[in-house]
Amino acid sequence: MQTSEHETCAETVTAALREGMAALTDKLGSDVATWRWDAVHRAVFPHQGLDAVGLLRPLLSRSMPSAGDWSTVNAAPVDIDHPFEQREVPGYRQIVDLSPANDSRFLDAVGQSGHYLSRHYDDFLPDWHDVRHRRMRMDRSDIEKGAIGHLRLVPH
């Protein structure tokens, strides 16, 4: 790219650093020692299908602070148009225990219900944020004991 003035690489990098520091200072304050990545960086969970409707987005889509980036276990790239948002996040995590203890774990990012009026629409978000997996129930009696309800599907 050509500009009206000749700039060295050092001048360009210094200008970019100053701009970045100014933007972060506006968001986080002047005490760099207190800055936290997750104070500006958010994991975004758009509603499938309706996130594009601006009026519905605040009601249906979710986001939360996130410390992950492209180089962490909680890997998620950022988009140049949204530099502080993770829009591709691990939505489901699973740890499979193949031992006789069968202590397998899972974590769904948002919740178990796709209905936004359900209390289970986004109830897993705090666990996702804190990386707290839930035990997978594999034994029928354990499943029945932990059930919060039953859904019976009857052919018509």
Image (cartoon, rainbow, N blue to C red):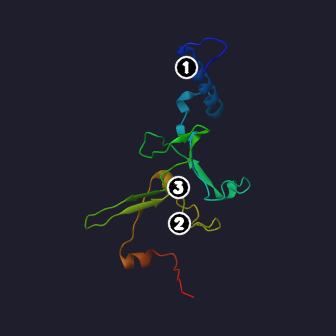
Residue 153: x percent and y percent?
A: 53, 83
- Image x and y of residue 58, in percent: 69, 54
Tell me where residue 29 appears, x and y as whole percent. 63, 30
State the residue position of label 2.
Answer: 112
Residue depicted at 67% across the width and 13% down the height: 4
Residue type (three-letter) at the residue carrying disc 2: Gln
Disc 3 secondary structure class: helix
Q: Amino acid at mark 3?
A: Pro
| Residue displayed at 54% across by 87% down | 155
Marked residue nearer the N-terminal end (3 or 2): 2
Outermost residue toward the front? 2
Instruction: Determine which residue is flagged by label 1.
Output: 13
Which circle, 1 or 2, is nearer the viewer?
1
- The residue wearing badge 3 is 126
Residue 143: quarter of image: bottom left
Q: CA distance from mark 3 to mark 1?
A: 38 Å
Residue 51, picture quadrant: bottom right
Name the element at disc 2.
loop
